[in-house]
Amino acid sequence: MVIVSFRARSRRSQDKMAFWRRNTLVERERHVKANARDYIDKFSYADNHIKTSKYNIFTFLPLNLFEQLQRVANAYFIVLLILQLIPMISSLSWFTTIVPLLLVLLITAVKDATDDYFRHKSDQQVNNRQSQVLIRGSLQNEKWMNVRVGDIIKLENNQFVAADILLLCSSEPNGLCYIETAELDGETNLKVRQALTVTSDLGDISKLMDFDGEVICEPPNNRLDKFIGTLCWRDNKYPLDNDRMLLRGCVLRNTECCFGMVIFAGLQTKLMQNCGRTKFKRTSIDKLMNTLVLWIFAFLICMGVILAIGNTIWESRIGRRFQVFLPWTEFQSSAVFSGFLTFWSYIIILNTVVPISLYVSVEVLRLGHSYFINWDKRMYHGQTNTAAVARTTSLNEELGQVQFIFSDKTGTLTQNIMLFSKCSINGQTYGDVYDEFDQKMENTEKTACVDFSFNPLCDRRFKFYDSSLVEAVKLEDPAVQEFFRLLALCHTVMPEEKTEGHLVYQAQSPDEGALVTAARNFGFVFRARTPETITLCEMGRAVTYQLLAILDFNNVRKRMSVIVRNPQGQIKLYSKGADTVIFDRLDPSSEDLMCTTSEHLSEFGGEGLRTLALAYKDLDEKEFEVWMEKLVFASTVIENREDQLAVLYEEIEQGLKLLGATAIEDKLQEGVPETIACLNLAGIKIWVLTGDKLETAMNIGYSCNMLRDDMNEVFVMSGHTLLEVQQQLRSAKEHILGLSRVGSAGDVEKSDVFADSVLEETIIAEYALVINGHSLAHALEPQLEHVLLDLACLCKTVICCRVTPMQKAQVVELVKRHKRAVTLAIGDGANDVSMIKTAHIGVGISGQEGMQAALASDYSFAQFRYLRRLLLVHGRWSYFRMCHFLCYFFYKNFAFTLVHFWYGFFCGFSAQTVYDQWFITLFNIIYTSLPVLAMGLFDQDVNDHISLCYPSLYRPGQQNLLFNKRQFFLCTLHGMCTSFLLFFIPYGAFSVLVKEDGSHLSDQQAFAVTIATSLVIVVSVQIGLDTHYWTAVNHFFIWGSLTLYFVILFAMQSNGMFGIFPSHFPFVGTASNCLSEKSVWLVILLTTVVCVVPGLVVSFLRIDLFPTLTDKVRHQQQSRKRQGPQEHNLRQSRRTSSRRSAYAFSHQQGYGELITSGKNMRTSRASTARSAERTQHSSNWIENMLKRKNEVSCIPDESTEAPGEEPQNVTDSVTASAHTH
């Protein structure tokens, strides 16, 4: 039975993320009773069906039409179509508008339907997954979509959790189970969940059928780390928290089976509550086009008004004299009404300033640019057989305008793979390889690995390159053996040995798994554990240690220790943790070793490695017994138990003897530092939004060189209250700007975007901002969000850690709302979906955390490094091509259309067209469509290699320099001037022109043919001058279009066409008579030269006097000719730093108590806890280049090309005979 209480009124959204609200009815609390499906049907809880698509078969047509009519141009064309259906004002046939309009709507609809089909397919795949549901006394297979709230379902090992369920019982002791939450928070380490003791024995089907407990809990929400509820059963109440819940998206691991009761289903699960709704994304150029269409329509009305007034005056003064010859029709009652009709006639005639073919061409270009991304072999990842995929075709040019990138960390920047890299034992470092000249060598795939064949239990995947450490182990060096013995004993890893010798370690932290695996390979194999013992295989000998105590890790202690008794009866304490914590507890006898080890730790930290210090202590039997009594007593007290235990831990962890230190490499994805450096040089700000803890996030920041020791300040925001966060934010802002820029405590200074952007450019010092999830929640409040945004934009680096998926989306939304900037979000897990959907552009990485991010994204590929090529090559080219395409398109159509305007002054404002109707119909469809498409598809100012070498070339897109309102005005002015010359030069020539036989050449059709021929030649010459990159396709289309024009012209004015369609082709022989005259060709030549030369002169003067960054680069490349650009080596240098960290622990407090209690000891399971601090230094290898913001910056494309290798352009596959214009 499910009882629900709703408020009967609608609630208006108060917060900025309101578009994620699924309905207007708000649930106060949820009452769920198990095994009562019939009663559940009376209430309106969501079922388990999910939907991420936008349309269905019934809503597709109206919704898609509504979206397409949001384009002002489409609505404009529909109005024109209606006007053309009125015979008294239409000079053109209605089909000239409706056919292209339907074509545009159809092509866009097919594209949108295809995109949504794949979303439907993904939804069906998830909804049709099978789940075992307890129905009428037996387990029955049901599709996920049919699972209901209140159902009891069975989960088996490695299955996805179908809904948010309350764990009732499991096959493990004490109701334990293990889950992986990668799709929720990006963490691949296992987490433990435990059922209530009172329900943990409900493993029998009959008992589960009799279970009628009622859960009273919070309503559906998006808080992944919090759940509040109460189970009422058998007249008792039991508190419920998040540790009792299995959330949708989790995977059951290392647990044979478990049972749970569905609390939230479908769209009300926490995973779906964190997923943003699929939004209709439009580019900034689309939005600008809407504005420009309104401008053009206003300009069109102005021209119509001018010509209508002219018609009224002409009819009243001159036209009346012609009424005997040209009488007014019956509906023409006056000159004013004639002018009114003429106004609408000219609106129809002049509508080609925005032709429908423009939008068809734009869609074709976007489709072509998307295929170039899909076909790019340099974005193909061979190891996973994954190619780049453009999942949308409408955002390509937006890729060339990105200013903010929001990136996940785990699986996006890193591989989430930990490798034991180096260590320091008793003052000696191991891990480096030296050549015969005693020079340190870099470890590569070709470097010979250490042979571990002496150890039959070794992990074959483990690689280590320094053979001297193996020799020390074989020589039974006491310090080395004790070092690896500590690693094999001091942890909470659970082993699983399915077959003899085949060990699998389950660890909550990949760091800890790497350390235990290292000990395993060096001969100290962790084989098994019980609540009282730990069994090792030391150099082939089985050794069992008695486990006396586990001193667990927490964020305050930053260390963990174990106390064991070895077979000889000696009691030893082994401890590992942050170096600063361990060093403070060392015996004075270890002082010299501590200094040496500290130097090694600095070296390890400088190389970006995660470090831990290791120490041990021999305990006296009596001393330990006394301490143990105190521990037992402290473990039973109710008040201040944790504080008393911490005092006892501190007491026994004194006087430690140092063994050494470990260094683990958290492997970044290939090319991540170079990619981030390159994108920084392109003026793109990168913010990292991660669910990991602060130390881990900062460590990766140093590894990626986003954080550096030479930064002026790294601000860490960790306040727990609104006032604390407010004070920290304001203090940081004051530190950067000074008191003059910050208002009083109650006021938030709000400056316009332009002023802020100018101020940001004047900040010379480099700052970084690191903020955790608790502080971010307060900082996103309305009264603080402006301060947060201002501070973040003044910093070079922003890292948000411990953030929820919803907070990721809120940060992106904050920047979108207050900054006039294009945002891009990139991630690889389900926890990144809401961020990906919120940003202007969403990029998914096909990673190890599933395909949810890739399926929800606009673009997807396998590696973060491909983002560099996606933006700097494909994005920049798409923006460049689209902008030049639009400029040329408006130019040629203004030149084509405004000839009618000038002609109106010489035809009595009668709305007569200069050209014949067939030329008007075919001009944009055949005569000029293909050359401009070729330019829009293949043109490039520089090739892909130069685009990657000079990231600063990306900046014009960020500043909207190539197509904006000013550029639109200039290209339309150019078109107006061209139309003026196209009309008046032939008009003036024809007034005095005679044929070779002395007769006049002044008929209207000859005049029309001359202007039309001049127009086609002028726009063809102009596109040739505007083309930067010539291919065989460009040549074919330009020359082919010119040839096609003359073929069609002579064909339409031939005797044959007249004989077949006399009413449609009445002008027989006009073209041959006109174009056979040399004087006409001279007029055409003169018109072409006069139209083209001024623009050519202006272009040369601009390049010479006011060169753009692109002009400078092109000139530099031409001057170097075959010499490649000077390359700066940006490979990550070896860093030296005093910063180091030690956090090879899990992200939460450990499960030492769980292990020693024996609750999880029936089978091997993972449960641990470890953490530590890690800070790391990075050299200033990119420092100088980051400061050269306004200069040409050069980076070699090291990740894609070998030195001296000329890259192959994407378009080279289309034509092999391309050369640069």
Image (cartoon, rainbow, N blue to C red):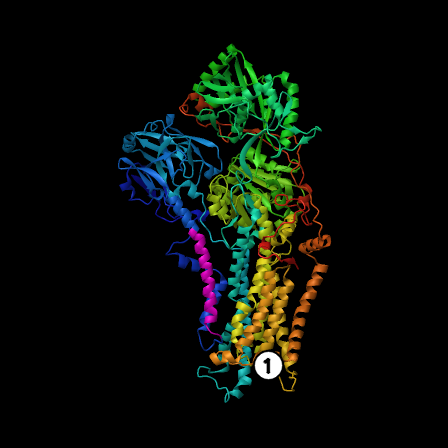
Name the residue at the top extreme: 622
- Please state the horizontal and vertical placement of residue 9, each as a whole percent of the image: 36, 48
- Residue 16 appearing in the image: no
**Can residue 380 be seen in the rendering of this structure?**
yes
Q: Residue at x 69, y 53 (%)?
A: 1113
Q: Give the vertical position of 666 relative to 757 (above or below).
A: above
Read off the residue under disc 1: 1073
Amino acid on which the number 1 mark rests in the picture: Asn
Q: Nearer the viewer, residue 805 or 309?
A: 805
Residue at horizontal 41 percent and vertical 50 percent from the top: 120
Q: Chief secondary structure of the magenta span?
A: helix
Tell which of 496 and 13 is nearer to you.
496
Residue 690 as seen in the image, left or right of residue 595 = left
Highlighted range, magenta = 92-117
Residue 1039: x %, y % from top left = 60, 67
* Quarter of the image that includes the C terminus: bottom right
Choose top left, top right, bottom left or bottom right for residue 414.
top right
- The quarter of the rendered structure image containing the N terminus is top left
Residue 587 painted magenta: no
- Residue at 65% across / 51% down in the picture? 946
Q: On screen, 728 above or below 968?
A: above
In this rendering, the count of numbered labels is: 1
In the displayed structure image, the side of residue 160 where residue 608 appears, left or right? right
Nearer to me, 724 or 716: 716
Please tell me whether mark 1 sits on a helix, a strand or a loop: helix
Indicate the position of residue 12 as horizontal and vertical percent values: 42, 49
Mark 1: few, some, or many residues within 10 Å (few <14, many ≥20)? few
Could you tell me residue 772's position as x and y percent? 53, 37
In the image, taking residue 456 as reference, residue 251 lies left or right, namely left
